[in-house]
Each structure stands twice: as C-alpha cells, then as structure tokens.
Image: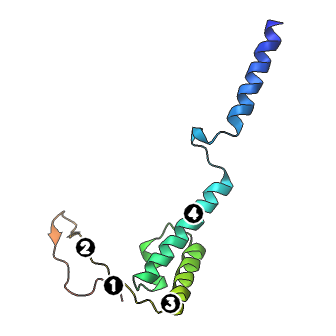
Amino acid sequence: MRHSSSIVAVLLLIATLAGCDALGLESAEAVAERRDAEGRALGGACRHAGRAIEDCYTLNPRADKAAVFAGWREMNDYMRENQIEEVAPQLARAPRRTTRGQTAAEPEGDPKVE
C-alpha cells in the first residue's frame, strides 16, 4: 500500500512540473516567438534611427534576419504613413579600443555607417 501511494505522489509531482514555467524552461515555440519579437524590435529601431537594413544586419549578427527585415519594413511603412522623421542617436559613442588596449579618438560627424 505504501509503495502505491509513493508512485501516485511522484506522478502528481511530475504532472505538476510538466507545465511549470517557473523552472525557467521555455518551449521551442516560446523561444521562437521571443526571437521574432526581438528581431522585429531591432529592425524597427534601426529604421527609426535612419539605418540601412544592411547596417542593421551588421550591427545585430545574431538576430534573425527575416524578423529584422519585417520590423524594419513595418516601421518604414508606419513612418511614411504618419510622416515621421528619422531620429539621430543623441548619445556619444564610447571610445574605441586599439589592439594594445589604448583608446582611439572617434571621428567627428554623423555616427551612421554609410
């Protein structure tokens, strides 16, 4: 009798934990949705900042290119429909590091990659 109650308890525990997101386990669908949303957000932000799609790909090599492009295109359409101008970044870039660990001066002018 004691053996069967232990089995029931273990089965209940397994059933409870199988659908539990508190363990930090994400399903493949949730990961794909998150990556798509992040890619779209990156693409939209790149377009809003006036970056070319190729520059956006270069700056975000780990992002899904299809999602980045979809976000860039959606923001482009939205900006055209609502006559929204591009917004140039306001923060200065951090100084670059040379191969010896020294800082190099950043060139003056527009920070966009042409």
- Placement of 16 over or under 8, stated as above or below: below
As drawn, which residue projects farthest toward the top? Answer: 1
Q: Quickly name the residue at label 1.
A: 112
Which numbered disc, 1 or 3, marks the residue that appears first in the sequence?
Answer: 3
Residue 28 position by quadrant: bottom right
Front in this rendered view, residue 95 or 69:
69
Judge depth for marks 3 and 2 and give the one in front: 3
Give SS at disc 4. helix
Q: Quickly name the residue at label 4.
A: 35
Q: Quickly name the residue at label 2.
A: 93
Give SS at disc 3. loop
Front in this rendered view, residue 51 or 86:
86
Say what amino acid the circle numbered 3 marks.
Asn
Say what amino acid the circle numbered 2 marks.
Arg
* Residue at 75%, 32% in the rendered image: 15
Could you tell me residue 39's position as x and y percent? 54, 70
Q: Distance between the residues labelled 4 and 1?
A: 25 Å
Give SS at disc 1. loop
Circles 1 and 2, Cβ within 8 Å, touching? The answer is no
Which numbered disc, 2 or 4, marks the residue that appears first in the sequence?
Answer: 4
Q: Quickly name the residue at label 3.
A: 82
